Image (cartoon, helix red, strand yellow):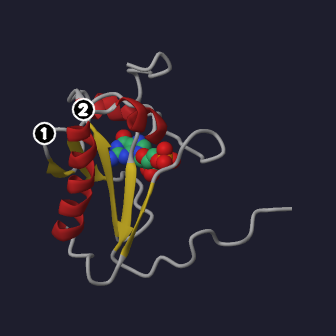
Amino acid sequence: MNKNYDIENIFFKILTGKIPCDKVFESDHSLAFRDINPRAKVHVLVIPKKPYLNLEDFTLYADSLEKVDIFDCISKVVKKEKIMNDGYRVLTNIGEDGHQEVQHLHFHILGGQPLGGFIKKLLIN
Ligand code: 5GP
C-alpha cells in the first residue's frame, strides 16, 4: 500500500462495509456506486477494491487483471445506466490541482443529460 494512503478515507470505509453505498455493479476487483452528491442525472463512481491513491499509483502498482477489470466495470455501468447511445463523460481527479477530494482512485461516470463543455471557461491567466 502507498505510504500516503489513508485507510480512514470514505471510499475505504465503503469497501470495508463500514458505511453503506448505493451499489450499481461489483466485479472481482472493482466497485461501482452512485455519487452521494450527483452532478448529473447519472453520476456513478468506479473504484478499485485495493487501496490505490490515484491513477498514477494504480498505473504503477495494479496488476493487469485489475487494470482490465476497472475498464470492464466502467463499460458495464455505461450499459446498465443506458447512456451508451447519447454519450457520457469519464473523468478522474488527481491531487491538489485536480481537486481530488477523496484519496482513493475513482472514475466519475457522468451522463443522462447534455454535460456542456469540459471546463466552463478558460482558467489560464
Ligand atoms: P473527487 O473530487 O475526489 O474527484 O470526488 C469525490 C466524490 O465523492 C464527490 O463527487 C463526492 O460527492 C463523492 N462522495 C464523497 N463522500 C461520499 C460518500 O460518502 N458516498 C458516496 N457515494 N459518494 C461520496
- Eyeballing the image, is 36 above or below 122? above
Q: Nearer the viewer, residue 117 or 75?
A: 75
The residue carrying mark 1 is 28
Residue shown at 74%/69% (left/top)?
A: 122
Query: Residue 25 appears at what percent x and percent y?
Result: 16, 52
Which quarter shows the N terminus? top left
Q: Nearer the viewer, residue 87 or 110?
A: 87
Q: Amino acid at mark 2?
A: Leu
In the drawing, what numbered circle is on residue 15? Answer: 2
Residue shown at 38%/66% (left/top)?
A: 110
Query: Residue 107 appears at what percent x and percent y?
Result: 38, 51
Contact, mark 1 vs mark 2 (Cβ under 8 Å): no
Q: Amino acid at mark 1?
A: Asp
Viewer-nearest of discs 1 and 2: 1
Query: Dot 2: what SS?
Result: helix
User: 122 left or right of 8?
Assistant: right
Which quarter shows the C terminus? bottom right
The mark that comes first in sequence, 1 or 2, is: 2
User: 42 left or right of 93?
Assistant: left
Give the CA separation, mark 1 to mark 2.
12 Å
Residue 51 found in image quarter: top left
Residue shown at 35%/78% (left/top)?
A: 87
